[in-house]
Image (spheres, grey):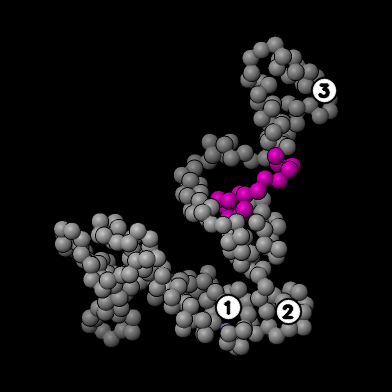
Amino acid sequence: MLHPKADVGRLYIPRKDGGRGLIDVETAFKTATIGLDHYLKHKEGQYPNQVLEHERSKAKNSISKNATKFKREVTMPEIQNREDKSASENAKALKHVSKMNNLKGETEGLLVAAQDQAINTRNYQKVICGQQVESKCRMCSQHEETVDHIVSGCEVLAKTEYISRHNNAAAYLHWSICKDHDIEVANKWYEHEPETVMHNKDNNITIMWDMPVNTDRTTTANKPDIIVKDSVNATCKLIDTTVPSDRNIAPKETE
Ligand SMILES: [Zn+2]
């Protein structure tokens, strides 16, 4: 599913690199030729050998010559992986992408289009399509209605949508932590309602939700989303989540 406004070039970028992983016809032809050449070279028997000899004697469009040329042009994943020392890194990235595979085609298409900044925002209508329309945000009428603004910059959405998004992300984290400590939780993360204080079976792990922390200095941010207290190892983890847009990551990390 390609969103009508999404970037076409991105279709052919491998999924692990954030593309949609389609194979274009040219690459398919090249990989098929390389495969055929490999087959002819390694298959025992009278006929493959004859074909190979015949192909090698050809000046033009010879399978073996083309294959040698194509091998330089196409990066076949199996060749790449063998040479790639960071293959485990790739696997990690793939695992991440496989989550995207659970999405419906339409949903993934829309997400990718939004990442391309190519959905039908007012700013897009005016600046890219050149239409005579109001380009300010439909919610706040203060800023340009861009993807970036809708996702993380709108004061009107901040009061409702951003808070529930943040709470959902934190609740998912809370649900995963509870599961890690064998605390009974709902099957689905979105059915999980975090309790203020939860204990594990041995009573040595306490997980607190949205609990204020007494500090020796006055601070406005004294309420981390999650606190994990481990009385065996005498540790206490304070976890606070934020859903920043790319341009906000640096300031949020210092927070
Ligand atoms: Zn707005």
Q: Position of residue 29 (x, y in %)?
A: 73, 37
N-terminal label among 1 and 3: 3
Q: Is residue 174 visible?
A: yes
Q: Is residue 233 visible?
A: no
Q: Position of residue 164 (x, y in %)?
A: 43, 75
Left/right of residue 98 with respect to residue 173 in the rendered view: right
4 versus 17 height, above or below: below
Dot 1: within a 10 Å radius of its alpha carbon, few (fewer than 14), some, or many (20 or more) residues? some
Q: Check residue 27 for magenta coloring.
A: yes
Which one is nearer the viewer's eye here, 22 or 250?
22
172 versus 61 height, above or below: below
Q: Which mark is residue 58?
A: 3
Dot 2: within a 10 Å radius of its alpha carbon, few (fewer than 14), some, or many (20 or more) residues? some
- Nearer mark to the viewer, of 1 and 3: 1
Which one is nearer the viewer's eye here, 147 or 221?
147
Bounds of the magenta span? Answer: 14-28
**Going 76% across and 74% down the picture, which residue do you hit?**
129
Dot 3: within a 10 Å radius of its alpha carbon, few (fewer than 14), some, or many (20 or more) residues? few
Q: Is mark 1 within 8 Å of ligand 1?
A: yes
Q: Quadrant of ligand 1?
A: bottom right
Which one is nearer the viewer's eye here, 147 or 78?
147
* Amino acid residing under circle 1: His
**Residue wearing tag 1:** 149
Report the number of numbered marks.
3
Q: Which mark is residue 126?
A: 2
Q: CA distance from mark 2 to mark 1?
A: 15 Å
**Going 57% across and 77% down the picture, which residue do you hit?**
150
* Amino acid residing under circle 3: Lys
